[in-house]
Image (cartoon, coloured by chain):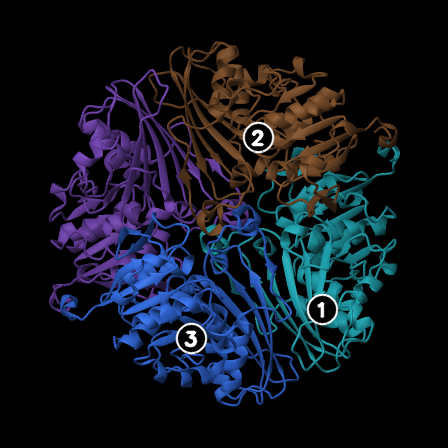
Chain colours: A purple, B brown, C cyan, D blue
Amino acid sequence: MPDSSSLPTYRVGVLGASGYSGRELCALVTGHPQLSLAFATAHTQRGTTLRVRASGAVHDIPLIGPEEADLAGVDLVFAALPHGASAEWVGKVIAAGARVVDLSSDLRPGHGGTTHALPDGVPADAPYGLPELFRAPLHGARVVANPGCYATSVLVALAPLAKAGLIAPGATVNIAAASGISGAGASPKLEYLFAEVTENYRAYGVGNAHRHLFEMRDTLSHLGADCDLLFTPHLLPVDRGILSTITVPLTRPLADPLEPFRTAFANEPFVELTTGLPALADVQHRNVVRIGAVSPTGMRQPTLLVFSAIDNLVKGAAGQAVQNANLMLGLPETAGLQR
Amino acid sequence: MPDSSSLPTYRVGVLGASGYSGRELCALVTGHPQLSLAFATAHTQRGTTLRVRASGAVHDIPLIGPEEADLAGVDLVFAALPHGASAEWVGKVIAAGARVVDLSSDLRPGHGGTTHALPDGVPADAPYGLPELFRAPLHGARVVANPGCYATSVLVALAPLAKAGLIAPGATVNIAAASGISGAGASPKLEYLFAEVTENYRAYGVGNAHRHLFEMRDTLSHLGADCDLLFTPHLLPVDRGILSTITVPLTRPLADPLEPFRTAFANEPFVELTTGLPALADVQHRNVVRIGAVSPTGMRQPTLLVFSAIDNLVKGAAGQAVQNANLMLGLPETAGLQR
Amino acid sequence: MPDSSSLPTYRVGVLGASGYSGRELCALVTGHPQLSLAFATAHTQRGTTLRVRASGAVHDIPLIGPEEADLAGVDLVFAALPHGASAEWVGKVIAAGARVVDLSSDLRPGHGGTTHALPDGVPADAPYGLPELFRAPLHGARVVANPGCYATSVLVALAPLAKAGLIAPGATVNIAAASGISGAGASPKLEYLFAEVTENYRAYGVGNAHRHLFEMRDTLSHLGADCDLLFTPHLLPVDRGILSTITVPLTRPLADPLEPFRTAFANEPFVELTTGLPALADVQHRNVVRIGAVSPTGMRQPTLLVFSAIDNLVKGAAGQAVQNANLMLGLPETAGLQR
Amino acid sequence: MPDSSSLPTYRVGVLGASGYSGRELCALVTGHPQLSLAFATAHTQRGTTLRVRASGAVHDIPLIGPEEADLAGVDLVFAALPHGASAEWVGKVIAAGARVVDLSSDLRPGHGGTTHALPDGVPADAPYGLPELFRAPLHGARVVANPGCYATSVLVALAPLAKAGLIAPGATVNIAAASGISGAGASPKLEYLFAEVTENYRAYGVGNAHRHLFEMRDTLSHLGADCDLLFTPHLLPVDRGILSTITVPLTRPLADPLEPFRTAFANEPFVELTTGLPALADVQHRNVVRIGAVSPTGMRQPTLLVFSAIDNLVKGAAGQAVQNANLMLGLPETAGLQR
C-alpha cells in the first residue's frame, strides 16, 4: 500500500449537497484518499451543516449557497441538482474551467425525454458515465453525464445480451424494478413520510412514463438491440437499493445463464455475478452491480430472467460519479470506493 | 339490519390455528355473526392460547391438539395445515360428516405440482373456491379447495382477459409479484427474522418453480387461454399484502384498459377497480381484490399492464375461506367479511 | 341488536381533515351508526378527496375549505387544527350554535404551556375529555378539550395511584414514552421522511419541554399528587402507537401491582389490564388504554413500574374525541368504537 | 500511513460465528490490517459458508464444527457462544495456550446472575473489557470478559458521574433502554419473525430481571456509587442499535451537563459527546458510544438526563472485542475499527 500522504490530491465541490445523492457524494469525497472537499452547496439549507460519516468518524460539513461556490478554485464539480436546473450550472462550471460530473438527466442520452435547449458551452454529446459499458471516452473527460439509477441497473444487465445479439428482434424486454425511497430524493412530500411508506408497496410512473426509460432506450439501440422496453418501477419500504427483475426473450436458449455476463465483465471491479439471486442487502452501501440469471422452465420462447441489484445512491448515483471522476482525473478507478 | 340473535349459526373448527392463516381464520370466525368457533388446533402450541382481535376486543382462544378436535361436532372445518399434511385431515373431516374448506394446495387444480395420491374419500376434483370466477359449484359444496394467495391475485386479474379472448395466443404473460412475509408462514426460520428482512428485498422461487404456478396454469387453460406464464415472486419487508404486476400481450389494443374488468365484475362485492394504481395499504385487512390497468406507450405488441393487490391473509387465504364457507352453508356471501 | 336504521343520528363536521387525526375522525364518523359526516375541511388540500376505510369499504370524502363549512348546519364539530389556530375556530363553532370537541392543546388544562388569551366566547375551563377520570361533566357538554395522546397514556396510568395516595410526596415520577410517527402529524418535514426514520430511534422534546407535560402536571395536581414529573418522549420507526414506561416511587409496597387499576377501572369499557406487558400491536386501531404493572426487585424505595399502551390516533386522539362526542350527544359511550 | 504489509499479524479464530456477534466479528477480523481469520465455527451450520462484507468486497467464510477448530494454532480466540456454554470453551482455549476474549456473560462481574462454578483454569476475575473505564489490566491480558451491550451503553454514561461523586447516595438511577432486535441473536424464534416485530414495540425482562443488570451493579459499586438501578429494556423494530435514556439524581446541579463527560473522556477515540441528542443512525456500524446530556427543568431534585447510543453489535459486542484484542496483542487500540 503506497503512502497516501504523497499521492496527488484534487479539490472538488458538490452542488446540491443536501439531497440524498449530494450527501453520499460528500461522504465519499471525505473518505477518498485523493479528493478533498472544497465546498458543498445547498439552496434552502445554506448556513447549516451536513453530517456525514466517513473513515469511521462523523464529519459536520458547512453548507454554503451555490452562488458563493468558488467554481474556479476546484478541479472538478459534482452537480447533484434537480433535473432541468442542472444544465445551467454545468455551463457555469465549464466556463470556470473545472471538470464536471452531472448527476441529473439533462446531459444524458435521451435527455430525460425533454427537448430543452442546453445552455451555451454545454455539450449535447457528453460521454455517458457507465464505465463498464463505455470506459474509453471517460479517461480525461471534462464533462460526464452520470447515468440514472434504474438505467444503471438495467443497462449493465442488458448490455452483454445486446452486444452478443441474444435479444430477440422485435420482442419486448420486460423490466419490473423496485427501488428504496431515497431514490425519490430528500424533498419533503406527504407521500414519502414514514407513515405513508411503511408496510406499503405500489407501482408508480407506469406505462413507460419514467424519465430513465429514455437513456435505456437510446443506449440499447446504440448497442444494437432492436427491442421494445416495458419499464415498471415500484416503491419499496426500504431506504436504499434497487432490484430490477428483467425478462429477456432470447434468439436462442442459453446452456449457462451467466455465461454472457462472465465474458463481458471478466475484469470489472464493480460487477459481481452470483449463481444465486442478488438481494438488496448484498449491495447496500457498496459501489457494485450484482447480477444473477435463471433460465425459466416451461416456456415456448427461449427466455432469460436477469436480476440486477445496486445501491441507488452508490453505484446508482454518487459512487458511480466518483468512479467517473477517478477516470476523468487519471486516478485509479477504484480509489475511495472500496470502503 | 336484522337482529343477528335470531339468525341461524353454524359451529366451525380451525385445524392449524397457530399459523398466520389460522390466526386470521380464528379472528374472522370470532367476529362472524353466524359462525361460532368450536375448536382451534395447533400441534406444537397446544395447551397455550391464541390472542386474536375481533369486534373491537381482544380474545384469548385455547389451542388443543388436532387429535382432540371433535370433528363430528361441527358443521364445517377450515383446514389450514401444511401442504402435503392436509389431505389426510380433509379425509378425516369428510368421514366425520362435516364440510371442509382446505387452505393447502393438496386439492387444488394442479395439486401444487405434486403427484401424491389423495386419501380414500377425498375428491380429486373438489370445487376451486374462487367465487368471482367459479361461483356455482360452491353453493352447498361439502369440500372446497381454497386458492393460493398469488393465484387469487393473478387469476382474478387474468380471467376477464382470458374469457374475452384478449390474451395473444402463444405469448408469454409475465407476472412479477411481491408478497409480505406473512405469506411465508409463522414457522421460525432464520431467513424470516426481522433483522434479515428489514431494509431487504429479493426474488425467490424463480424460473417457474413456485407451487402456485400449477393452479394458475390449469385454471387459465380451463378458461381458454393459450399462453405461457412466467411467474417471479419477491419477498417484501412488509407484514401483509401481495401486489402482482402483470404484463399481458393482447390480441388487439384496448381503448379503455379497465373495460374487461368492469364487464366481468360488475356486481362483485369483493372486487374493486381503480383508475389509479392499487397499493398494499388499500387492501390490508380487507377481503378484496383491487385492480388497476394501464396501456403502455411505445410498444409494437398491443399490451396491457394489470396491477392486482390483495391481503394475502384475507382474500388470499382466510377471508376467501370464510367467503367459501358462507356459500357452502347458504349464508350471505359477505357475512362476517365487511368489518 | 337494535335496528340501527331507527336510531337517532347527528350531523357532524371535521375541521382539519387532512391531518392524521382528522383522517381517523372521518373514518370513525363514517363507520359510526349514529353520526353522519356533513363536511370535512382542509386548507391546502381543499378540492381533493380523502380516502378512508370504514365498514369494510373504501370511501372518498370531498375536502372543502374551512370557510365553506356550514357550521350552523351540524350538531357537533371536531376541530383537529394546529395548536394555536384552533381556539379561533372553536369560537366560530360556538357562535354558530354547534357543540365542539377540540383536539388541540388550546383549551386543555395548562393550555399547552402558552398564555395566549382565548377568543371571546371560548371557555377557559372547558371540561377535559378523559372520560375514565372525569366523566360527569362530559354528559351533555357543549365544548370539550380532547386530551393529548401522551397525556392520555400517562394520566390513565397514574390517576388510580394518585387518587389512592400511593405516589410518594415530593418524589419524581419518571416517564419514558415512545410514539409512532403519526403523532408528529401529516405535514411533510424532512425529519419524518421514511429514509430518516426507518432503522432509527431518538429522543426529542427532552428536559420537560413537551407541550403535553402541562396537562399532565395540572391534572395530577388536581388529583392530589404532589410529585415532579420527568417526561422524555422518543420517536419510533412505527406508524401508530404510544408506549409509556412509568416509574412511580410509592408510599408503600404493593402486594398486587395491578390492584389499584382493578379497583379504579372495574367497569371501564376502554381500559384493559394485563398481567403481562402491553405491546403496541395489542392496541393499534383500537380505542383502549392497555395497562400492565410490575414491582421491581432490589429497590430500597418501594417502586411501581407501569406500562401504558394506546393507539395515539384512536384513544390518543380521534377515538377519544368520538367517545366524548357520544357523551355530549347522549349516545352510548361505546357507539362506533368497537369495530 | 505505514505500509500495512510489513506490520505483524496475528492469527485469530471465532467460536460461534453464525450468531450476529459472530458474523460481525468475522467481518471485522477480515477487514483488520493485523488480524487474519484462521477459523470460524458454528454448531448447526457447519459445512456452510458465512457471507460477510469487509473492505468493499463480499467474502464467503467456511464454517467448521467447533471440535475441528485448531485452538493451539492461533494467537487469540473470540468466544461468541451462548451464556452458560462459553466458559467450557474458554477453558479449552486457555489450555491450548491461546488468548481469549469471551463475549458471553460467564466471566463478567456478577456472572450474569448465575452461580455456576467455572471450569478448572478459567479465572473468576478476568479483566472486564471496557477500555474506557478499565484500560490498564487489558494490556497484554490473556483472558478478557467482554461487556454486555446494554452494560456498555449504561456504564460509559454513568462512570464519570460515579467517579465524580455526583450520583445522589441511596437514590434510584432509572434506565429505560431500547435495543434493535439483533441483540436477541440469530436463533429463529416466533417472536423475532419480521411479522411479529414490524410496527410493534414492547418492554421485556422488566422489574430488574435482565442479565446485564448484574455487571452494571457490580461495576458501579466498584466505582463508588451507592445507588439502586432500575433497568427496563425494550425491543425496537430496528436491526441494530441501543439507546439508553438514563435519569440520574445528582448531589448538586450541573451548570454544564456535558462537563463530567468532557473531563473523563478527553482523549478517548471511541466516545463522542454531542450537545444535541444521539440517535441510532449516528452510531450504527461504528465502534463508538455517543453521549448527550440535558438538565431538565421543573425538578426539586437536581437531576441529569443522559442519553447513550451504541451499535449493539459493534461497541456493544464485536467491535469492543476487537478493541480488547488490540490491547491484549499490543496493537494500536483503534486498528481495524475505523472503517
| Horizontal arrangement in the rendering, residue D91 relative to residue C19 (left or right) | left
Separation of residues labelled 3 and 2 (CA atoms): 50 Å
Q: Is residue D247 above or below residue D70?
A: below
- SS for callout 1: helix
- SS for callout 2: loop
Q: Three-letter amino acid code at disc 3?
A: Asp
Q: Three-letter amino acid code at disc 1?
A: Met
- SS for callout 3: loop
Separation of residues labelled 3 and 1 (CA atoms): 57 Å
Labels 3 and 2 share a subunit: no
Question: Which residue occupies 51% across, 38% down?
Answer: B184
Q: Which residue is mark 1?
A: C216
Residue B247 placement (x, y as % from top left) = 42, 23
Mark 1 or mark 2: which is in front?
Answer: 2
Which chain is disc 2 placed on? B
Mark 3 or mark 2: which is in front?
Answer: 3
Q: Quadrant of the C terminus of chain B?
A: top right
Q: Which mark is residue D120?
A: 3
CB contact under 8 Å: marks 3 and 1: no
Out of A265 and B78, give the one closest to the viewer. B78
Q: Three-letter amino acid code at disc 2?
A: Ala
CB contact under 8 Å: marks 3 and 2: no
Q: Residues within 10 Å of mark 2 (few under 14, many from 20)?
A: few
Residue A79 placement (x, y as % from top left) = 27, 51
Q: Is residue B161 above or below residue A166?
A: above
Q: Which mark is residue D28?
A: none
Labels 1 and 2 share a subunit: no
Q: Quadrant of residue A164?
A: top left
Which chain is disc 1 placed on? C
